[in-house]
Amino acid sequence: MQSTLHPRPPAGLHTGIIMDGNGRWAELTGRSRSRGHVEGARVARAVVEGSRSLGIGVLTLYAFSADNWKRPATEVRSLMRLLRVYLRSETESCLENGIRIEVIGRRDRLPPVVVREMAAAEGLTARCDRLLLRLAIDYSGRDAILAAALAGPTSRREFGWNLDRAVHARTPVPDMDLLVRTGGERRLSDFMLWESAYAELVFTDTPWPAFTVEDLASAVREFDRRERRYGGLRPSRTAPGARVRSRTTAPTGAGTGSSAGSGVVTAHEPRR
Ligand code: FPP
């Protein structure tokens, strides 16, 4: 069975961000790639701070993919160092601001000192409930799905639990509502493949170090303009009694097995 410490995430949108473009931003501005990542961490800090006021309850940031190990050792080292420093420096302010930190992904390949910082950040902020900040580190959506399937689930619900367990997620979260990718590419890069089945995708050419909270607000406004049908029909053509709710309505069924959180039209809302 999974941990029941946090049966529910904070209410609000589940937003994911693929923070791409650090390297190109650095090259364009005559800085080193490491400097690009440092600026990226600064932007992550600002975006985390601004998220709650945009109605985001769960923010999943793709900080290091399982494929990022293919990068030069110096870049990997500087990213690991940055993640360690970020976790250490942000934990206190997350605690003060009610932000729960969770790290999802593999832990066995990370430097032990990073794993220690992750555990400390998670432990200290475990009771925070204003925003759930999930940092995806050494994360692969495909590997998570494979692990969940190989565990032999007997139901979709159990598959959801397996998926959480595969990436060490403590809090079951609703499916992703909004997925933003910066930096000009238009792909998922192995991020949240299962969870983003019905996510609204927003791509921007802005490289991550130049991204602002206003850009995130604009992505949320774009999300608000989209009509989510989950494979069904337009609201006016759905069956009488189809439930239509505002994004600002607090979710009622959040947790593994539910995609509650922000759906505008829920009549055909799929279940995990
Ligand atoms: C992609 O840019 C970004 C990464 C591989 C790392 C993301 C990490 C950060 C934003 C900093 C750390 C984050 C936190 C939350 C502490 P890229 O290097 O692939 O850029 P490029 O495509 O322009 O080369």
Image (cartoon, grey):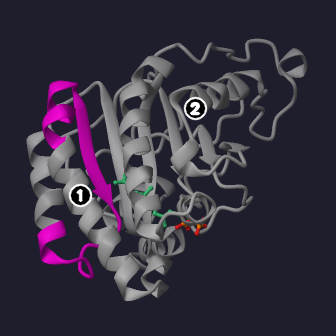
Q: Quadrant of residue 38?
A: bottom left
Position of residue 100 in the picture relative to residue 151 (left or right):
left
Q: How many discs appear?
A: 2
User: Real-space Cα distance between discs 1 and 2?
Assistant: 36 Å
Mark 2: few, some, or many residues within 10 Å (few <14, many ≥20)? some
Q: Which residues are magenta?
A: 91-114
Name the residue: 50% across, 70% down: 145
What amino acid is found at the position of numbered circle 2 in the picture? Answer: Leu
Name the residue: 44% across, 42% down: 43
Name the residue: 54% across, 34% down: 212
Say which residue label 1 marks: 1
Q: Position of residue 60 (x, y in %)?
A: 44, 47
Q: Position of residue 5 (x, y in %)?
A: 17, 42
Say which residue label 2 marks: 216
In the image, 214 versus 231, the foreground residue is 214
Is residue 111 placed above or below 180 in the rendered structure?
A: below
